Image (cartoon, rainbow, N blue to C red):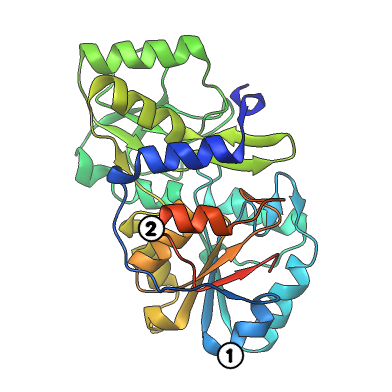
Amino acid sequence: MSYGDTLRTDQAFERYEQIRARMPEARFGNDTQACSGLLEIADQYDAFLLDSFGVLNVGERAVPGAIACIAELRRRGKLIAVLTNAASYTQITATERYARLGFDFAAHEVISSRDVAARRLSEVLPNALWGAIAAPGDGFEDISARVVHWTGQPVDGILMLSSVSIDGAMLAALRDELARAPKPLVVGNPDLVAPREAGLSKEPGFYAHALADDLAITPIFFGKPFADAFDDGLGVLAGIPADRIAMVGDTLHTDILGGAQAGMGTVLVRDHGLFAGLDTAPFIARSGIVPDFSCAAI
C-alpha cells in the first residue's frame, strides 16, 4: 500500500512549488492575522467551507475540539460545508464516515473532488469507458459514466481517485499505457499528500504530476485548488457571497490558493495537517500564498 510511502513537509512543499505553474493564480493580502480559532472570527463570515484531513480529522480520528466548534458555529447560525479532495468515498459513505467520527454533516453538506469530477466526465469525453485507479473495494455506482477498475485493459480514459493501490509496477504500466495510446488523465484528487497517522501519504496528484513531467501530458484536475470544486461549494452555500465565506484548510497550495482564487476569505490551520509542529511563516513568505487568518486548530 502506497500510504506507507510518506513525504516530509519540506519535500511536499518543494514539490508544490515545482508544479505551481499548473495551478490557478490568485491575489492575496499582505498579512496573516493570528486567531484562536473559527469562533473568534465567526462574525466576519456567514459560512465556512472546511477541508477534511488536517482540519476535521487526521486519518481515522477527529481533531480534538473540531466537533464542538462545528456545533457552536451552527448554533450561531453559520452555514457549514465540507470541501474535501478525498475521492475514495461516495457522498453516502463519506457522510457515514464523518458520523462515525462524531460530526453531524448532512449528505448535501459534503462535497468531494470525486463528485466534482464525476459531474464533468461526460464533458471531458462523452460516452467513454474510464479505467479507474481506485481503492480495491471502491464501487462506481454513484458515477453516471462507465467506470471499471483499471488493470491494464483498453479504456478511453484514466480516472485517478485513490493512490492506495499504486506501486512501482502499476505506475510503470500506467506510464506505458499513456505513452502508447494517449488518452485523458482525469485526476479526482489533486493533493500531493494527505496527513495520516503514519505521516504524509502520497496522493493521486503526486503521481499525476510525475506522469505529466515524464510524458509532457496535461492531466485534468478536479478538486482544490481548481475552480470547479469551489463552484460546487458555492452552489451548496447558495446565496452567500464568496467574500462572506471562509475556506478553512491546512495546505497553502490547495485550500488557501483555491479559496483566494474563488474570492473567499481563507484560514490556515497549522497543528494537525501539513505544517504540524512547524512555523508556517517561512512557507507563506516563500510561496507568496498568504492566508487571511491562521490558527492552531479550528
Give the quadrant of residue 99. bottom right
Foreground residue, 141 or 153?
A: 153
Which quadrant would residue 199 be assigned to in this image? top right
Residue 46 percent location from the top left of the image: 51, 85
Relative to 183, is 114 on the left or the right? right
Q: Where the N terminus falls, by quadrant? A: top right
For the point 28% across and 49% down, the residue is 120
Q: Secondary structure at mark 1?
A: helix
Residue type at numbered disc 2: Ala
Give the number of the mark in front: 2 or 1: 1
Residue 235 at x, y percent in the picture: 38, 71
Drawn side of residue 241 relative to residue 203, left or right: left
Residue 297 seen anywhere in this rendered image of the structure: yes
Q: Which residue is mark 2?
A: 229
- Residue at horizontal 30%, vertical 20%? 214
Q: Residues within 10 Å of mark 1 (few under 14, many from 20)?
A: few
In the rendered view, tell whether residue 298 sits above or below residue 201: below
Work out how far the residue at label 2 is from the one at label 1, CA to CA, in angstroms: 25 Å
Mark 2 or mark 1: name the one nearer the start of the chain.
1
